[in-house]
Image: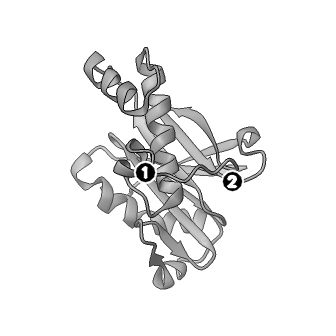
Amino acid sequence: MLTIYAIDIQDSKSKHIVAHRLLKQVLTLSNLSENLLQSAKRTRGGKLLAGKHYINITYADSFAFIMITEQSFGIDAETLKPVSTQVRLLLSNLLSISISNDWEFYKVWTAMESEIKYYDDKGLFDALTGKLKKNHALQTFHVMYEGNLIAITSTMNNIKTQKVLFKKCKDETV
């Protein structure tokens, strides 16, 4: 089972600060020591690596989502909103695929972003220009949470059959 900690942060300007402050709470909820953060190092792509634990954080509007795993994962979340036809066509043309509606757009976009985050040393330019390694062991699946589409990418066996548990966290200092 994968656990994703969901934090609804009303002040979008401070969501990065609040999410990082709540990491201690998330570590405690995950039965991990807060001391892990003291030895944590940022990977090349900015992901926190604390001992053998990968700390993945993604943001969507007022939400921050945190996932702590023992193997590399990529996670991306987007709040579903209308997408202009021009933006859908642009992504369709860049990726040479057909994207006919907003749902397809967000599935493609979040899958692409979570794959970028899985590799940790790649960026959007790499994905849009076909420079991501083709790793056939990579699998991506999607889940919904309160109007947010979340893509999770990993080489974990049976990733698509994993249950996802969402745990809400609150910032008590706000």
Image point 59% across, 77% down: which residue?
A: 33
List the single residue furthest toward the left: 13
How many discs mark residues in the rendered view? Answer: 2
Q: Residue 52: x and y, percent?
A: 63, 75
Quarter placement of the C terminus: bottom left
Image vertical order of residue 146 relative to residue 59, above or below: above
Image vertical order of residue 13 relative to residue 161, above or below: below
Secondary-structure class at tag 2: loop
Residue 36 vs residue 143, the one in the foreground: 143
Name the residue beneath numbered marker 2.
155
Q: Amino acid at mark 1?
A: Thr
Image vertical order of residue 167 relative to residue 45, above or below: above
Image vertical order of residue 44 relative to residue 82, above or below: below
Q: Amino acid at mark 2?
A: Thr
Residue 174 vs residue 128, the one in the foreground: 128
User: For mark 1, does the 10 Å Cα neighbourhood hold few (<14), some (14 to 19), or many (20 or more) residues?
Assistant: many
The label number, if any, that marks residue 33 in the structure image = none
Q: Between tags 2 and 1, which lies in front?
A: 2
Q: Residue 88: x and y, percent?
A: 34, 22
Q: Residue 31: x and y, percent?
A: 65, 69
Image point 49% across, 51% down: which residue?
A: 132
For this view, does 114 lie left or right of residue 53? left
Name the residue beneath numbered marker 1.
58
Image point 41% across, 19% down: which residue?
A: 102
